[in-house]
Image (tube, helix red, strand yellow):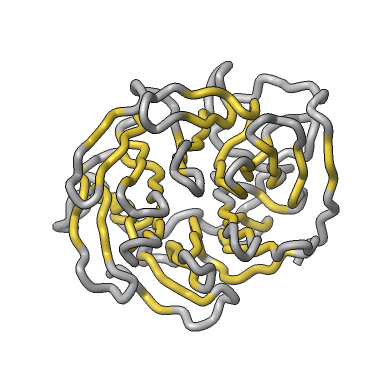
């Protein structure tokens, strides 16, 4: 466990041009593999509140003998009804609207909007570094991050016309905390590097929610459940495996829920967590209770 103070910073801090695809703290000691030793992986799982379905990305590497195609799949939480929804070789990040009528995804370096169940595709951006798109609670905006170059930072966009604007320079791995607030990973040298921060979309404040100086990050992806206020994320303590951690609302203490876990996400009621198991030869989706109990395998 780690204890983290909470701070509040004005927006008069300076920013620096950081162009890192991921962040690591301190030295680089020997540590376990970040990903399972398998030729396929299921990840980026997200729950649909309206349809009680889970969408996820299945990646099949070129040398795999797996019969499934790479792309976005749909499955029920009980493991039934698995089907390919959208064929794509390079997909990184998906999210579902609260009403379940649309998915947004990073596909081939572009952000695309997909109707459900029809599968109509609307391209929202040109090809580029657009990562981890997430719908706002009301569906009126999409947040995402750009990781490289002078435009690196956290953005929000209109899902109908594609117009977008920067909210926070030098941030990544964004999620919605409230209808007008975001949580993200800080890449600004003026604040703790790799901290989980919160800001409103008007950039009136920045709050450091969780600073992790003893943890090495590998593309962390914090997720906040709006109703319960819980935050879950994956991170790696030096010398240990990639693990799933939780931060309770109003608490300064994190809890390690499970070792060998990647990209956790909440069920709509916040009582379940879907995640990728990163043990050797696994790489499949599993579901557990919010407190880390009752773990069951979802995909095979």
Image quarter (top left, top right, bottom left or bottom right) of the N terminus: bottom right
Q: Residue at x 34, y 54 (%)?
A: 100
Q: Residue at x 56, y 73 (%)?
A: 290
Residue lying furthest left: 67
Residue lying furthest bottom: 294
- Tell me, yes or no, if residue 184 can be seen here: no
Viewer-proximal residue among 55 and 33: 55
Q: Position of residue 125 (x, y in %)?
A: 36, 24
Q: Position of residue 112 (x, y in %)?
A: 31, 34
Quarter of the figure with residue 243: bottom right
Q: Residue at x 34, y 29 (%)?
A: 110
Residue 177 located left or right of residue 206:
left
Residue 223 located left or right of residue 81:
right
- Tell me, yes or no, if residue 276 can be seen here: yes
Quarter of the figure with residue 108: top left
Give the answer, above or below, for where 224 lies relative to 126: below
Give the answer, above or below, for where 105 lies relative to 275: above
Residue 67 located left or right of residue 49:
left
Q: How many numbered marks, from 0 up? A: 0
Q: Position of residue 24 (x, y in %)?
A: 65, 42
Image quarter (top left, top right, bottom left or bottom right) of the C terminus: bottom left
Q: Position of residue 107 (x, y in %)?
A: 31, 36
Viewer-proximal residue among 15 and 138: 138
Give the answer, above or below, for where 162 lies relative to 219: above
Q: Residue at x 39, y 55 (%)?
A: 43
């Amino acid at each position: 466990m780690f204890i983290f103070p909470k701070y509040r910073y004005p927006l008069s801090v300076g920013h620096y041009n950081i162009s890192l695809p991921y962040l690591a703290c301190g030295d680089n000691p020997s540590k376990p593999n970040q990903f399972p030793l398998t030729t396929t992986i299921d990840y980026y799982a997200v729950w649909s509140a309206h349809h009680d379905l889970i969408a996820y990305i299945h990646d099949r590497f070129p040398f795999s003998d797996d019969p499934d195609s790479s792309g976005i799949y749909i499955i029920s939480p009980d493991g039934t009804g698995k089907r390919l929804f959208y064929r794509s070789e390079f997909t990184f990040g998906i999210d579902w609207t609260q009403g379940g009528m649309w998915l947004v995804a990073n596909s081939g370096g572009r952000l695309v909007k997909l109707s459900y169940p029809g599968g109509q595709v609307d391209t929202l951006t040109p090809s580029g570094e657009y990562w981890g798109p997430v719908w706002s609670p009301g569906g009126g905006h999409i947040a995402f991050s750009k990781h490289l170059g002078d435009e690196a930072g956290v953005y929000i966009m209109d899902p109908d016309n594609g117009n977008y604007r920067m909210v926070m320079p030098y941030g990544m791995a964004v999620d919605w905390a409230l209808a007008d607030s975001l949580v993200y990973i800080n890449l600004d040298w003026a604040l703790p590097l790799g901290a989980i921060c919160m800001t409103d979309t008007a950039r009136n404040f920045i709050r450091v929610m969780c600073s992790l100086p003893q943890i090495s990050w590998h593309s962390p992806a914090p997720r906040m459940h709006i109703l319960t206020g819980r935050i879950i994320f994956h991170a790696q303590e030096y010398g240990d495996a990639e693990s799933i951690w939780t931060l309770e609302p109003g608490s300064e203490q994190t809890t390690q829920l499970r070792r060998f876990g990647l990209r956790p996400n909440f069920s709509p009621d916040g009582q379940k967590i879907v995640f990728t198991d990163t043990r050797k030869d696994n790489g499949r989706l599993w579901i557990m209770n919010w407190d880390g109990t009752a773990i069951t395998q979802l995909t095979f």
